[in-house]
Amino acid sequence: MTVTHLSMTAPNPGAEPIADLSKAPLPTARTLRARRNIGLQFLRFLSFNTRIMRMVVKGHK
């Protein structure tokens, strides 16, 4: 079975929604600023890479 056309605006009639996100909380202004902050993102990047490298090093012992 192949899907040839996907539509986000017109679901199949009578079909159940896959996920109802209408009640999902929206990010606050503070959260949005943090997501756009290059310095913070770089620190998170370094932190994530450090954790991954620690796992790799532990796995090679």
Image: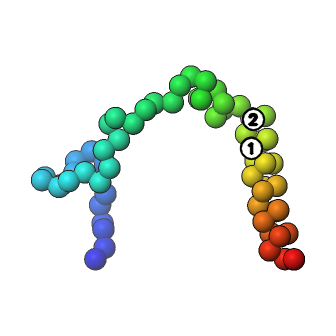
Q: Quadrant of residue 18?
A: bottom left
Q: Which mark is residue 44?
A: 1
How far apart in space, not on screen, are marks 1 and 2 (Cα)?
6 Å
Up/down of 36 relative to 43, above or below: above
Q: Position of residue 28 (x, y in %)?
A: 53, 25
Up/down of 25 relative to 58, above or below: above
In the shown orientation, is residue 42 left or right of residue 36?
right
User: CB of mark 1 within 8 Å of CB of mark 2?
Assistant: yes
Q: Position of residue 11 (x, y in %)?
A: 22, 51
Q: Residue at x 12, y 53 (%)?
A: 14
The residue carrying mark 2 is 40
Up/down of 54 relative to 39, above or below: below
Amino acid type, residue under disc 1 in the picture? Arg
Q: Position of residue 31 (x, y in %)?
A: 59, 29
In the shown orientation, is residue 7 left or right of residue 12?
right
Q: Residue at x 64, y 26 (%)?
A: 33
Amino acid type, residue under disc 2 in the picture? Leu
* Colour scheme employed for the rendering of this structure: rainbow
Q: Which mark is residue 2?
A: none
In the shown orientation, is residue 20 left or right of residue 59?
left
> What kind of element bears circle 1?
helix
Q: Residue at x 29, y 61 (%)?
A: 5
> What kind of element bears circle 2?
helix
Farthest left residue in view: 14
